[in-house]
Image: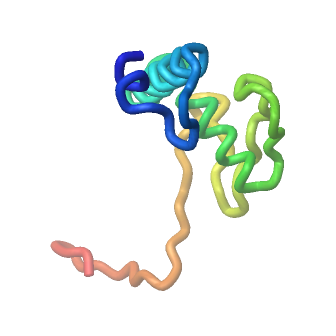
Amino acid sequence: MTFYTSNGIPRISNASSAQVDLAARGASWGDMVGVALANNLGPLNGQTVNFLEDAAQGAAVYGTSLASQPNHAAFQGGVAAATAASDIAVSVNMTGIASSFDSTHFV
């Protein structure tokens, strides 16, 4: 709170003590979200990735919690989420890459 009391709040001249308190709490909350995302703590990182993939496909539900988002569908040409250990091995088709090799080198 000392920071906002000393420096003010952007675009709010003469901020009230309640506004200063809210700004300080918001900054603290934002810092903790950043720590959780940077360190992959809890479900937030996975929920964020799921939301962003939903948004890219136009299937995101805005205005609801990240936990209530539908699971994203695989992108066109993408690989669906693995459901069993046998589903993990996936072949990748490369286009425009020569596949020739000799006995000692890949070319």
Residue found at the far front of this picture: 14
- Between residue 107 and residue 16, name the one nearer to us: 16
Colour convention of the picture: rainbow
Q: Looking at the image, is 29 positioned above or below residue 48?
A: above
- Between residue 41 and residue 1, name the one nearer to us: 1
- Between residue 1 and residue 76, name the one nearer to us: 1
Describe residue 22's horizontal placement relative to residue 80 as left or right: left
- The residue lying at 42 percent from left, 16 percent from top is 1
x and y percentages locating residue 106 in the rendered image: 25, 75
Query: Can you tell which quarter of the image residue 39 is in?
Result: top left
Tally the marks.
Answer: 0
Describe residue 93's horizontal placement relative to residue 69 as left or right: left
- The residue lying at 53 percent from left, 15 percent from top is 21
x and y percentages locating residue 3 in the rendered image: 36, 24
Q: Looking at the image, is 11 positioned above or below residue 100?
A: above
Residue found at the far left of this picture: 104
x and y percentages locating residue 62 in the rendered image: 81, 39
Describe residue 98's horizontal placement relative to residue 80 as left or right: left
- The residue lying at 55 percent from left, 39 percent from top is 88
x and y percentages locating residue 94 in the rendered image: 50, 73
Describe residue 12's horizontal placement relative to residue 76 as left or right: left
